[in-house]
Amino acid sequence: MLKVDGVSYRYRDAASPALQDVSLSIPAGGIYGLLGPNGAGKTTLISILAGLLDAGHGQIALNGQPLAAARAANPRAIALVPQDYAFYPMLTVAENLRFFAGVLGLNGREIKIQSDAAIAFARLEQVVGKRAEQLSGGLRRRLNLAIGLLGQPQWLLLDEPTVGVDPQSRHFLLDAIAALPAAGTSVIYTSHYMEEVEAICQRIAIVDQGRVLAEGALADILSSPEPQVELELDRPLPPDLAERYAATPLGNFKFRLFFRLTVGMTSELPRLLDELATAGCTVKNLNFGQQNLEQVFMNLTQRSLRD
């Protein structure tokens, strides 16, 4: 268990704190998602967990032990795969792996074993002799991931690990990351891509402006407790329909109009759709009962996730 209790952090000369009283309980053995837009505070929190920054206020414990003490007892317990490429472009894939394995304090035999395992995991066999600067964006991301796994960390911190890759590489990376808990590595995964978090994370925290807006099991966060319909329309909802269905405007995001309506049961949906068509409203998207992360985020912040 990784427990974050009341952590706050402000960068020097910043107008507002990057993190404000953040508290999270992150269980081991799964993939925990930190979801939020750029600038939400995700990277700051990851940097604190990785030991790159000291929390200004609050406490962090790993398995009941203060994080600094836990890291001192086992420096390889937590590894970070940053959003930026963290390798030397002029070195080959094999040279990068050997170098960073040495930095971790592995001996000659361990270096070979862990390097070979990382190469196999990231499927880098065909490029081990290539310089890192010659790799495609997807292969560079795979090398980043391979380096992070060299010390067999108990916890792996992934900060936007699929930025700038093609769909095929993204699919491979997500599948590889999803397999890590079964091999004994717990994952904290930060992203602003909602579909990625929905695909691989069991628990999530939604973060914006340094605060935790929602936290818990993904299924619980996505569930809708009331019989409500979320609509995307091409024009404003007529006032009579808005009153009849107790509509709540969810905002106008990039020329998209969103509304939440209350209905008694599923059987009322055809009537609602007929009334919308009669009023000249085209339904662009409809959700009933189950929300997606974009809808949850907009409900919490009243702005689009990618704004």
Image: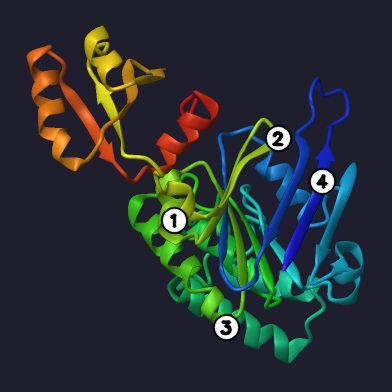
Q: Which residue is mark 2?
A: 210
Specify few, some or many for label 3: CA neighbours under 10 Å numbering under 14, 14-19, or 20 or more: some
Dots 4, 1 in contact, CB < 8 A: no
Looking at the picture, which amino acid does disc 3 mark? Asp
Picture quadrant of residue 208: top right
User: What is the CA distance from the residue labelled 3 to the residue labelled 4?
Assistant: 41 Å
As helix, strand or loop, the secondary structure at mark 4 comes to strand
| Pointer 3 or 4: first along the chain | 4
| Residue 273 image point, x, y percent | 13, 27
The N terminus, quarter of image: bottom right
Looking at the picture, which amino acid does disc 4 mark? Gly
User: What is the CA distance from the residue labelled 2 to the residue labelled 4?
Assistant: 12 Å
| Residue 94 image point, x, y percent | 60, 73
Residue 271 shows up from this direction: yes
| Vertical comparison of 182 with 55: above or below | below
User: What is the CA distance from the residue labelled 1 to the residue labelled 3?
Assistant: 37 Å
Looking at the picture, which amino acid does disc 2 mark? Gly
Dots 2, 3 in contact, CB < 8 A: no
Relative placement, left or right, of 278 versus 190 is: left
Q: Nearer the viewer, residue 215 or 153?
A: 215
Q: Nearer the viewer, residue 20 or 104?
A: 20
| Pointer 4 or 1: first along the chain | 4
